[in-house]
Amino acid sequence: MVRIFITGSTDGIGQAAAKLLLDQGHEVTLHARNAQRAADAQAALPKAAGVLVGDLKSISETKKLAQEANAAGPFDAIVHNAGIGYGSTSSKETTSDGISAVFAVNTLAPYILTCLMDKPTTRLLFMSSDSHWGGDGSLRNAAQSHSYGNSKLHDVMLAKAFARRWDDIQVISMHPGWVRTKMGGMAAPGSVSSSAKALAGWASGENSLAKVDSGAFVTQGVLEKQEELMGLCKQISGVSVPGEK
């Protein structure tokens, strides 16, 4: 039995993967952005260990979520699955913290949670997308950008940055494919089930993936940008990586 925490697990790939894991006998803690969605998620997946509530658009709520997750843990695997973009009502929103909602949810929240939550014992995943290929790696105005592609590039960068720091666990980013979800739309060629199966297999340890490279084989420029993004997230959130000033 593996203990797993999945953000953004009230619908789509997150919920589908959680259901597979629960059916296999694993312990899964869900996450929802508000109380109503939490109640719906618990009703849909009654075997879940619980549903933690926190709006990832808010820095303060994300910090509180990290505290509650630590109380519910420890976890063997953590999946940063929550994301917004592609025409959602929040995709062009600026949050009360003065940053893009897309940056807040897709980039800053996984950074804050990773820093403040107890490190998982074996696995950590940042959900990315092949849209990251169109992201702007310069990081110009990154916190104000509403670009989904930019935020998904950030997730790849964060995964690599944390992988270099935490070489005792597996840290990866994942492209789930273009699948038929609320975000992906009904025209998408892929199914939720295939992506959920891949995610669940990884989270449970059933499918062992090669460890993400530690940064030794990336160019110095890319490495510097990873650290620039980490510094930007620290500056905005006031949260540091454990053990770093």
Image (cartoon, rainbow, N blue to C red):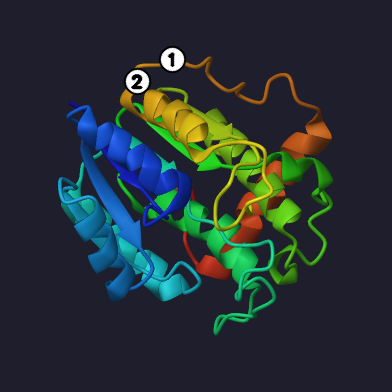
Residue lying furthest bottom: 96
Q: Point out residue 16 in the picture as x, y percentages from the top left corner.
A: 38, 42
- Kind of residue at badge 2: Gly
Q: Which of 163 and 180 is in front in this view?
A: 180
Query: Which circle marks residue 208 in the picture?
Result: 1
- Kind of residue at badge 1: Ser
Split into 4 quadrants, where in the image is the N terminus? top left
Task: Using a 10 Å C-alpha cutoff, classify the residue at mark 2 as few (fewer than 14 neighbours), some (14 to 19) or many (20 or more).
Answer: some
Tell me the residue at 67%/54% (across/down): 151
Using residue 219 as the reference point, say whether residue 194 is left or right of it. left
Task: Using a 10 Å C-alpha cutoff, classify the residue at mark 1 as few (fewer than 14 neighbours), some (14 to 19) or many (20 or more).
Answer: few
- The picture quadrant where one finds residue 169 is top left
Q: Point out residue 235 in the picture as x, y percentages from the top left corner.
A: 59, 65
Image: 202 above or below 133: above
Query: Which circle marks residue 26 in the picture?
Result: none
Tell me the residue at 47%/26% (across/down): 198
* Residue occupied by mark 2: 205
Tell me the residue at 37%/48% (across/down): 15
Q: Do the residues labelled 2 and 1 touch (CB within 8 Å)?
A: yes
Image: 13 above or below 77: below
At numbered mark 2, what does the secondary structure look like: helix, strand or loop? Answer: loop
Q: Which of 139 and 151 is in front in this view?
A: 151
At numbered mark 1, what does the secondary structure look like: helix, strand or loop? Answer: loop
Measure the alpha-carbon separation of dots 2 and 1. 6 Å
Using residue 107 as the reference point, say whether residue 51 is left or right of it. left
Q: Which of 103 and 86 is in front in this view?
A: 86
Using residue 240 as the reference point, say whether residue 213 is left or right of it. right
Q: Point out residue 35 in the picture as x, y percentages from the top left corner.
A: 28, 74
Q: Point out residue 177 in the picture as x, y percentages from the top left corner.
A: 63, 36
Can the viewer see residue 80?
Answer: no
